[in-house]
Image (cartoon, grey):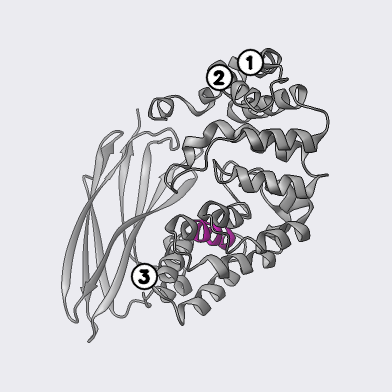
């Protein structure tokens, strides 16, 4: 796997992968036409991006396996490698991705067989993408089935129940019905929030974070209810699940994790130099004084308003520090913010505003000018 990780994602599915997958299937189904499969997998492969390659591998399976889906699903299930030994090696099963695609592409009319195949697959790689058409088009039956698996002995299966129902799963299709009405998801998250495996709880938190983008009040209400009798596991899920709302400075989210509205906090923010070249850094110096008569827990973030190509600002929130400040105390913090070009952020010259945020409230501001090329 270490060698594979050096490749671009799309290059994981190349001729060598096609040959390996063909051998895996032929080992349990000798009639499998390996050359036909490989030939179709590799058709115009260099012009295809990642998802298109996975789709083409799935189509090659469809052309090379029996016409009867139930037979094909059984063959693929039998061909799967050994169950992954732990929860940190999920990507070791990446070669099985097209198996999940095959189920997603062909399995909807065969619910029981598809669920059995995904139950096996998710213990070798993941079936979080494969299950999404079932969640969207056979919602009642799919959730009824997943509810029965919430105490499955396999942590991979328990995680699948949460990860496969994420409304905005990265690389996955959006689940529009659940975006409109997420109520079927709550029993899954309620059951798994205290799971012994962090791998499962992380999925619960990610599911919550997805839901918070469309139903912030529902997520806040749930987390507030959980927090009343939260153990260490649930506390972690709440904090991680609310991270999007916390970063945005949502007062209710901050209150749930213990950060109240700042009381008599006086702050300044100085930025130097006043002109920064692309590739350089802006040094921020924050002075924060607690003028109240009580100690306060502070979550300190800062906002950068990047200049856009057409002079529109794009705001990005960055974490700075969490601190406890005594009554009548004062402190000074320093932090450098790099202004480097990245693959996800273009930089444009002009005035860049900065804001200092404490427990969700803007308490000071500053600026610098980025020199264009």
* Residue 38 screen position, x and y as percent: 65, 16
- Of residues 35 and 260, which is closer to you in this image? 35
Q: Please give the residue where the numbered disc 1 appears in the rendered image.
A: 42
Q: Please give the residue where the numbered disc 3 appears in the rendered image.
A: 359
Q: Nearer the viewer, mark 3 or mark 2?
A: 2
**Numbered label attached to residue 300:** none
- Of residues 17 and 245, which is closer to you in this image? 17
Residue 309 appears anywhere in the view: no
Distance between the alpha carbons at the discs numbered 2 and 1: 7 Å
Q: Is residue 240 left or right of residue 174?
A: left
Q: Determine whether the residue tagged by mark 1 lies in a helix, strand or loop.
A: loop
Contact between labelled residues 1 and 2, with CB atoms less than 8 Å apart: yes
Residue 162 belongs to the span the image colors magenta: no
Which residue range is magenta in the image? 203-212
Q: Please give the residue where the numbered disc 2 appears in the rendered image.
A: 14
Instruction: State the residue at coordinates (37%, 33%).
Output: 341
Distance between the alpha carbons at the discs numbered 3 and 1: 54 Å
Q: Nearer the viewer, mark 3 or mark 1?
A: 1
* Residue 2 screen position, x and y as percent: 38, 29
Q: Quadrant of the N terminus?
A: top left
């Amino acid at each position: 796997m270490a060698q594979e990780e050096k490749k671009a994602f799309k290059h994981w599915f190349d001729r060598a992968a096609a040959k390996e997958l063909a051998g895996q299937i032929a080992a349990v189904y000798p009639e499998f036409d390996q050359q036909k499969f490989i030939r179709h997998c590799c058709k115009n492969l260099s012009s295809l991006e990642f998802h298109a390659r996975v789709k083409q591998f799935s189509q090659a399976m469809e052309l090379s396996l029996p016409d009867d889906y139930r037979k094909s699903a059984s063959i693929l299930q039998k061909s799967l490698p050994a169950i992954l030994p732990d929860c940190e090696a999920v990507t070791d099963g990446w070669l099985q991705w097209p198996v999940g695609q095959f189920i997603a592409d062909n399995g909807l009319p065969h619910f029981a067989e598809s669920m059995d195949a995904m139950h096996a697959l998710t213990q070798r790689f993941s079936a979080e993408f494969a299950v999404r058409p079932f969640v969207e088009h056979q919602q009642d039956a799919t959730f009824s089935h997943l509810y029965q698996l919430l105490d499955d002995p396999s942590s991979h299966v328990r995680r699948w129940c949460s990860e496969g129902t994420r409304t905005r799963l990265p690389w996955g299709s959006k689940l529009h019905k659940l975006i409109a009405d997420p109520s079927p998801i709550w029993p899954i998250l309620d059951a798994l929030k205290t799971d012994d495996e962090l791998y499962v709880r992380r999925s619960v938190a990610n599911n919550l974070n997805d839901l918070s983008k469309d139903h912030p009040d529902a997520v806040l209400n749930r987390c507030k209810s959980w927090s009343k009798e939260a153990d260490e596991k649930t506390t972690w899920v709440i904090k991680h699940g609310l991270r999007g709302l916390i970063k945005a400075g949502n007062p209710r989210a901050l209150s749930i994790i213990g950060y109240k509205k700042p009381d008599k906090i006086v702050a300044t923010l100085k930025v130097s130099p006043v002109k920064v070249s692309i590739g350089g850094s802006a040094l921020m110096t924050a002075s924060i004084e607690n003028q109240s008569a009580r100690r306060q827990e502070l979550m300190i973030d800062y906002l950068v308003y990047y200049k856009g190509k057409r002079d529109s600002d794009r705001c990005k929130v960055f974490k700075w520090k969490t601190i406890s400040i005594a009554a009548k105390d004062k402190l000074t913090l320093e932090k450098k913010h790099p202004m480097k070009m990245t693959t996800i952020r273009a930089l444009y010259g002009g005035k860049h505003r900065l804001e200092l945020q404490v427990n969700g409230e803007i308490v000071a501001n500053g600026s610098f000018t980025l020199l264009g090329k």
